[in-house]
Amino acid sequence: MKLDPVTLEILNNKIVAIAEEMYFGLKRASRSIYVKEADDFDVALLDTAGDLFGHAASATMNFLIDTPFAGTIKAVPDLERGDVIITNDPYTSHGLSTHLPDIHLIRPYFHGKRIVAYGWCFVHSTDMGGSVPSSIAPSLSEIFQEGLRIPPMKFVKRGKMNDDLLGILMANNREPEVNMGDIRAMLGSLETGETRVREVIERHGVQTFLDAQTDLQDYTAKKARDVLRLIPDGTYEFWDFMDDDRVTRIPLRVRVKMTVKDGKLELDLSGTDPQVRAAYNVPTNGKRNYWITIRLTNFLTTYDLSMAKNAGLYRTVRAIVPQGILMNAEFPDACGVRSSPSLRVSGCINGALLKANPELMPAPSGGNSMPFALAEYDSLGIKRSVQVIEPMRGGMGAMKGQDGVDGRDTSLNNMRNHPVEAVENDMGIIFRNYDIRPDSGGPGKWRGGIGQVITVEVLRDGGSFLSRGMERLRFPPYGVLGGKPGDGMRAILNLGRADEKKLTKFDQLPVNAGDTLTFMMAGGGGYGDPFERDPEMVRNDVESGFVSREGARRDYGVVIGEDEAVDEAATAKLRASRVKDNIRADFDFGPEREAWEAVFDDAVMSELNRRLLELPKSIRQDKRRWIIEQTVPDLPRAGAGLLVDVLSDADAARRRLKQAMARAFDTGAPP
């Protein structure tokens, strides 16, 4: 460390203040509701190697600290004062962007003729063209379908905007005015950053500013390793499932092996399923990436609130991400819904940490990142627009001594909800319900957080809803140490009407005036035996609307009398009569996952994936689909049927699986 602690603290505060000013400047000048209300954007200061050293304390997306910037910077040589790099392409940006709606800008900050830092910002653009409004749909198979790709290039050169590139960008965009407003806000934010960096250098000197960049990361790295030493040394394995890939009915598995030694971590994702012909792929470029380390970011920044947030957080974390798996997509795989498998990685790391020490972590959250949007025509039926209605979330998981947070999930990020009034002012919808979802939190001695429920009514004909990130329709968030899983997600068109329809995952859902759409978000997992929960806490949950009377009796063994008080005698009798055989000492994944893994267990799936990855990419998914469908020919779509029904004879299904794998790999069976 070159700087003394006092000077370093002063510089850290000034650097964070610069990022804060950049952050709020962008937010206040933006045009799209997804940026100015939900805060789906970020800013930072990068050192000369492209590592993040300054991040806004108010930012909703701390996990983006582990972003690889260097590849994009190296792709645009000969940077001059006033230049700004732009990109949104996951493959040519080397993992900086991970789907096309994320527009990234990087501006070099000069002192004399020397680059001394970079300013960076991104926004989630309302639309980047492509097959569907908002550019994201689960069933898209190639990135070419997802919109306009912009490889790293100069968007601004010596202070002058590239009008040709701007014209192409606007011509391929369904909301050009709104998105241009956001881009201008980004450029203004980067200009502010350069001004404030110049002032710090004038006050403290350029060498002190450069030393601070290195010293802050070194200091954070030391403190981060101390936090990671809280994890007992050892190897911990965990896997979790996505419901399906939308284009097939087949569940997708994400697997993590976490090895810990003296505060050094290795995350091995080798057992994860191969990439799919859908938009659930993550282009990490085979390297550690923020979509892999989300849960570690939460862990590190929770157990040491004092450390500066910069790239030093991850210095002792290594990732093994084989080519061709979901978490290391190969060009030109679609990747619009890349958050869904990433949330399962987060759940796997959460589970591995629970195995290492069950008091370190909570049960999993609802496990959804589900923005849903409306594409509609205006009242005259002329202009079509697309906007996100709400960035929906589930509840958070419970942990020892604490219930989960209700109606909120910050385990991915801390995005805000859109104010109802702002949405109704900008879109042709009206909110009919925006509430909590009773009984959705996983029962436990400490209850999982309750999910949200929301119903919107359409006011004009000819629109369509778009949804991505629908998960936990089949596999709910697991319970821990006797706790029960949270209730899974549900989606219903025209709830309570004669034409009511239960929905599975969809790309676009056509709607007309009077139609309603209801989302019931998953609750977080419970922690500890629910029959050990204080009956008075259960009574309070019933009074607050978090748990129904029937749920109190069924899940907690608590009887609420007509006087709204706990019937202590009836409660004691009910709790004493319970059969404890269904209380899990470790994890309760629910009957659907148990039915699936009775056939497709870890050993079988690891062997299947190993053999699939030995095949050319062009035939992997055909082979996989053929094998699974031979094994379970009547496999239902998630949300439309139960695995426990179609896999009631697990022995017969295992025989079919063994025969299908032998034919597919050993005798060259179709496809």
Image (tube, helix red, strand yellow):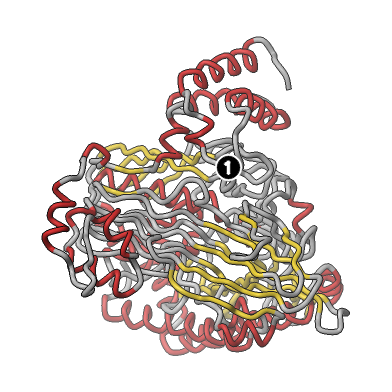
Packing grade of label 1 (10 A; few <14, some 14-19, many >=20) is: many
Residue 87 seen in this snapshot: yes
Q: Residue at x 60, y 60 (%)?
A: 492
Residue 115 seen in this snapshot: no
Q: Closer to the camera, 561 or 353?
A: 561
In which quadrant of the rendered view does residue 107 lie?
A: bottom right
- Asked whether, in this view, residue 461 is left or right of residue 85, the answer is right
Residue 623, given in percent of the width and then of the height, sits at: 66, 26
On the image, numbered disc 1 is attached to which residue? 326
Above or below 216: residue 569: above
Q: Closer to the camera, 104 or 60?
A: 60
Q: Closer to the camera, 18 or 354?
A: 354
Which residue lies most toward the top here?
A: 667
- Asked whether, in this view, residue 620 is left or right of residue 288, the answer is right
Q: Secondary structure at mark 1?
A: loop
- Asked whether, in this view, residue 162 is left or right of residue 32, the answer is right
In which quadrant of the rendered view does residue 462 lie?
A: bottom right
Q: Residue at x 37, y 69 (%)?
A: 406
Kind of residue at badge 1 = Leu
Q: Residue at x 58, y 18 (%)?
A: 661
- Asked whether, in this view, residue 142 is left or right of residue 445, the answer is right
